[in-house]
Image (spheres, rainbow, N blue to C red):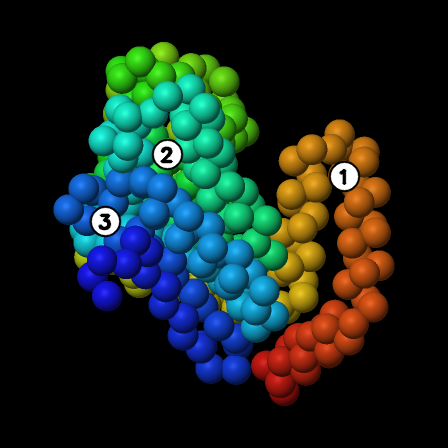
Amino acid sequence: MIDEPVRVRVHTRGSHGKIATVSINNPSRLNSLGRAQLTAFEEAVRTLGDDPDLRVLVVTGEGDRAFMGGANLHELGALDPPQARDFLTLIHRACKALRDLPVPVIARVNGFCLGAGLELMAACDMHLASDNATFGMPEVKIGLPSVVEAALLPHLIGWGRTRLLLYTGDNIDARTALEWGLVEKVVPLAELDNALDAWIASIVESGPKAIRLQKELIREWEAMPVNDGIEAGIRCIYRAYQSDEPTRMVRGAIDRLRARKG
């Protein structure tokens, strides 16, 4: 229905499992994030996370004008201090749902990606943008600091560029975002879905258990010193070999090599 705050679409990719898309459905307000959108988004993502056949989640916004245009200004303007804390907690919970999801999450960024929308994007694992995308953290321009998952930005773009975004509140274009490492790829808008499909194809051709273990390990690496991360990787490999996936897929790779040589 048109008045649903988010849209959820799930399709099966052959025998490779399910691919899901969750999109903010508020295009008349540049897909701004109010309580309804944030609550529905978190619920949708957490529900999808319970599906063992899920392989990839795509996060986007309806229409071509905006990925997510930030928090709903009308709701922000009516908050008192306790309500502000609760509202920002909703943003954090939506972001955390993406980071907790056991499979890769791809941000499909089309148009404006601002404020809370950029925080949701940063919480995704991979970031693909159209060449008309615009990025910014404009909170200081309306009297607010950037908080919650803005804390992820230094890991993506470094402290200096984080300060530049957060202190000035100025926007950057897609090419600058690519240069900074805020996104991994930029393509013309008409090619956005083809580029997205190529990423998805590479992921689903890999071992589903291996991909889930890899995401779990990357999350651990974020909070670990290097030596601890290496030890965590060894434990992860032990868990991988508790299923037949590595042996079966290695044998398949060997068979393909032999067939090419033959």
Q: Amino acid at mark 2?
A: Ala
Q: Amino acid at mark 3?
A: Asn
SS of the residue under disc 2: helix
* Image marks 3 and 2: residues in contact by CB distance under 8 Å: no
Q: Residue at x 31, y 40 (%)?
A: 34
Mark 3 sits on what residue? 26
Mark 1 sits on what residue? 229
Q: For marks 3 and 2, give the CA distance.
A: 14 Å
Nearer-N-terminus badge (3/2): 3
Q: Which mark is residue 116?
A: 2
Mark 3 vs mark 1: give the one in front. 3
SS of the residue under disc 1: helix
Give percent across and percent down for residue 68.
Answer: 29, 42
Q: Residue at x 26, y 53 (%)?
A: 25
Give percent across and percent down for residue 84.
Answer: 41, 25
Quadrant that contains the C terminus: bottom right
